[in-house]
Amino acid sequence: MNKINPFSLYEVKPTTVRYGKVYVTKVKIDVPFEKKRMVRLYIPEDYQPSKRYSVLYMSDGQNLVDKYTSAFGDWKLDLRMHELIKKGYSSFIIVGIDCPKNPTHRMLEYSLPGIGFNSKALKSIGETVNSESYGDQLLAFLVNKIKPMVDSNFSTSEISAIGGSSMGGLFALNGYITYPDIFSFCLSFSPAFQLYPRKKLIDYLEHNSSHIAKNGKVYFYTGSMGFEKQFFSPTLSMYHYFQKIGYDSTRLALIVDTCMPHHEDAWSHYFNDAIQFWLNKPNNKGKI
């Protein structure tokens, strides 16, 4: 009996997807709020079932490849992938999980477990919602449910990465630390470290430092224009922390652009820089 692939081709129009294809499936996630969620899987234009592809797992899946599914604009990752292939870099699969529609639920879902927000962040959440973070629950579901589903229905390799922006950048770094045997690269754009008291954040990292991948790579990005300014100093501090624990320039990168705002256009602009840092040198230049 042939197994049934739970993913179906996304054919809703209009769409801004020009290169590659998007597949979708709905899942029930074991989290406290908004359990039913869409998972969006992007396969590159040169995808061949006979080959094996690395997989980049990302938060805010609705914002990755199609402006018509996004709230604020998309990362245009189909175009970014097309550009990477033209430069000779190996293509890969991208899997995105849609975020909760309620911004407070999103904040809790992408947060670090057990260390508590600072007073400013708690005030923004309000008293009507349980403020206990559950980012560990979403990570567990991603690793134990979504990843096996992707691996069993698409041609994947053993290499996996994790990425995201803002709260998603925080979530990505936590995934990289929590599951070092699974995620060998972390793309952390505009990570929201400022939500935590600095001492508690460092204590969390120190407690988990033995879990941090010994051979992995981390790429940080931050701007400093407008709302993005609050992300600037905490991101620099995190970059210095990873230097302190032994990450050199071959495994750690930081890009700062003082002219960039807190927006998908900025993250799209630096996506390929991060991927080239992850993949090193191209191996098939001029393929397209």
Image (spheres, rainbow, N blue to C red):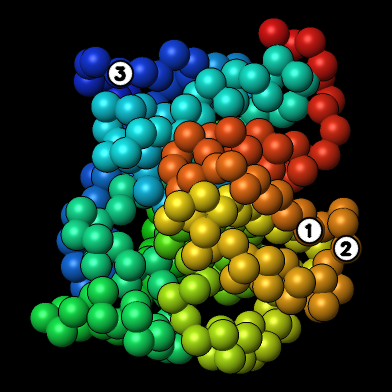
Mark 1 → mark 3, Cα distance in angstroms: 35 Å
Q: Are marks 2 and 3 in contact (CB under 8 Å)?
A: no
Residue positioned 49% across, 73% down in the render: 194
Mark 2 → mark 3, Cα distance in angstroms: 41 Å
Is 27 rendered above or below residue 238? above
At which x and y percent is residue 67? Answer: 33, 28
- Indicate the secondary structure of the residue bearing disc 1: strand
- Indicate the secondary structure of the residue bearing disc 2: loop
Question: For the residue marked with disc 2, what is the amino acid?
Answer: Asp
Residue positioned 56% across, 54% down in the render: 224
Question: For the residue marked with disc 3, what is the amino acid?
Answer: Thr
Q: Nearer the viewer, residue 142 or 248?
A: 248
Quarter of the image that includes the C terminus: top right
Task: Decide if residue 22 is in sight here.
Answer: yes
Q: Nearer the viewer, residue 257 or 65?
A: 257
Q: Are marks 2 and 1 in contact (CB under 8 Å)?
A: yes
Q: Are marks 1 and 3 in contact (CB under 8 Å)?
A: no
Question: For the residue marked with disc 1, what is the amino acid?
Answer: Leu
Of label 2 and label 3, which has the lower sequence position? Answer: 3
Of label 1 and label 3, which has the lower sequence position? Answer: 3
Quarter of the image that includes the N terminus: top left
Which residue matches tag 3? 15
- Indicate the secondary structure of the residue bearing disc 3: loop
Q: Quadrant of residue 30?
A: bottom left
Count the numbered circles shown.
3
The label on residue 210 is: none
At which x and y percent is residue 226? Answer: 45, 52
Dot 1 crowding, Cα within 10 Å, few <14, some 14–19, many 20+: many
Which residue matches tag 1? 252
At which x and y percent is residue 66? Answer: 36, 27
Is 226 rendered above or below residue 216? above
Which residue matches tag 2? 248
